[in-house]
Amino acid sequence: MCIYNTGSRTGLINSLREIRGELSPEETELRELTDSALTKLCALTDEDFAQLELYPDFDQ
């Protein structure tokens, strides 16, 4: 999700919906993963989204 994150929950939802339309029929696992992420993002509030750490901390 971090590569499609625009900085807002709604922006990320829009980006994921856009990329979902570009997936080929053979990319079923990626489509399922995208659908799962979209479901969870739609259920979040903007405040909860702001608290998410979407970027990995490779130093840990």
Image: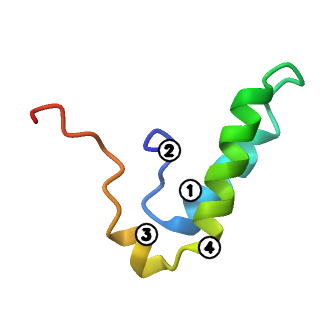
Q: Which mark is residue 12?
A: 1
Q: Is tag 1's residue or tag 2's residue first in the polypeptide sequence? A: 2
Colour basis: rainbow
Residue 19 place in picture, x, y as percent:
71, 39
**Which of pointers 1 and 4 indicates the residue nearer the eye?**
4
Residue 43 tag number: 4
Residue 54: x percent and y percent?
36, 50
The image shows residue 7, relative to residue 23, as above or below, that is below
Residue 30: give x, y in percent of width and height: 69, 31
Q: Mark 3 or 4, which is nearer the eye?
A: 4
Q: Is residue 4 left or right of residue 25?
A: left
Nearer-N-terminus badge (3/1) = 1
Residue under pointer 2: 1
Do callouts 1 and 4 mark residues in contact (Cβ within 8 Å)? no
Residue at (62, 73) in percent of width and height: 43
Find residue 6 and report its horizontal and vertical position in percent.
48, 55
Distance Cα–Cα, label 3 vs label 1: 10 Å
Q: Looking at the picture, which amino acid does disc 2 mark?
A: Met
Closer-to-camera residue (32/12)? 32
Q: Kindly indicate whether the residue at mark 2 contacts the one at mark 1 (C-beta within 8 angstroms).
A: yes
